[in-house]
Amino acid sequence: MTSAQAIIQAVVEGLTEFLPISSTAHMKFVNPMIGVDANDDFAKLFDIVIQLPAILAVVVVYWKKFFDFSRLNFYTKLIIAVIPALVFGALLSKYIDRALDNLYFIATVMVAGGIVFLFVDKWFTNPSIQDEQHVSNGVAFKIGCFQVLSILLPGLSRSACTIIGGMSHAGCHRKKSVGCA
C-alpha cells in the first residue's frame, strides 16, 4: 500500500465514520478503485487499525463518562450491549468473512439499509432517549441485538442499527404498540 492509497482510505474513513453509514463497506469499495489488494494481510490490518482513531475520538469526547468508575451501571449496560455482537461474531465468523468479500451483497445491503433509514422516523413516535439513565439492561441488550444486524449484513451501518434499536425502544416506551418489549 502506498502513502497516497493510505491517505485516500483515511479520508474515506474520516468522512464516513461518524455518519450512520458503513465506513467499513465504503473502504471495501475504495480498495479496488485505488488498486489495493483486499486479500493482502497488511491491507486487512490497515482497514482495522485506521478505525481506531475514530474510537479514540469517542473516548476523548466522552472521557468523563468512560472513566467515571463510580457509575457501575453504565459499564454493566455497555457490556450487556456488546455481548450479542461478540457471540454472533464468534459463531458466524466464516459467514461474515465471505459476506465481507462479496461487494454485490454489501452494495445491496447498503441500498436497502439506506431506504429503511429514510422511513425509520415515521415508524416511531417520540423516537429519542434523552439520557443513558433511561436505558435498562434489557434495552441495552435489545440495542446490542440490533447491532448484530450490522455483523450479519455487512454494509449495514452499526451506528444506524444502534440508532434504530434505541428509537424502537424510545418509540415503544412512549407508545405501547405491537412489537414493543
Image (cartoon, rainbow, N blue to C red):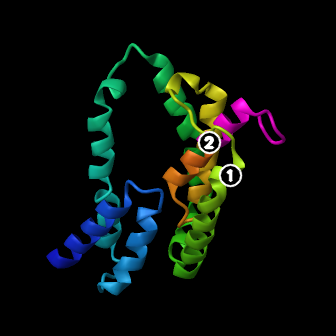
Q: Where is residue 46? Give x, y as percent.
A: 29, 65
Q: Is mark 1 on a helix, strand or loop?
A: helix
Residue 109 versus residue 35: which sits nearer the camera?
Answer: 109
Where residue 70 appears, as percent x and y from the top left, is 39, 13
- Identify residue for label 1: 122
Quadrant assignment, res 117: bottom right
Residue 94 position, x and y percent, is 58, 65
Nearest to the observer: residue 81 or residue 159: 159
Q: Which of 137 and 161 is in front in this view?
A: 161
* Gap in angstroms between the C-alphas marked 2 and 1: 11 Å
Magenta range is: 166-181
Q: Identify the residue shown where x is 38% and y is 53%.
A: 18
- The answer to whether 23 appears left or right of 97 in the picture is left
The image quadrant of residue 77 is top right
Amino acid type assigned to the residue bearing label 1 in the image? Lys
Residue 4 lies left or right of residue 51; in this view the side is: left
Query: Image point 58% across, 73% down: which residue?
Result: 111
Q: Quadrant of the C terminus?
A: top right
Nearer-N-terminus badge (2/1): 1
Which residue is pictured at 51% across the width and 27% down the height? 132
Callout 2 amino acid: Met
Q: Is residue 2 visible?
A: no
Q: Which mark is residue 55?
A: none
Q: Mark 2 points at which residue?
A: 167
Quadrant hosting residue 175:
top right
Q: Badges 2 and 1: C-beta atoms under 8 Å apart?
A: no
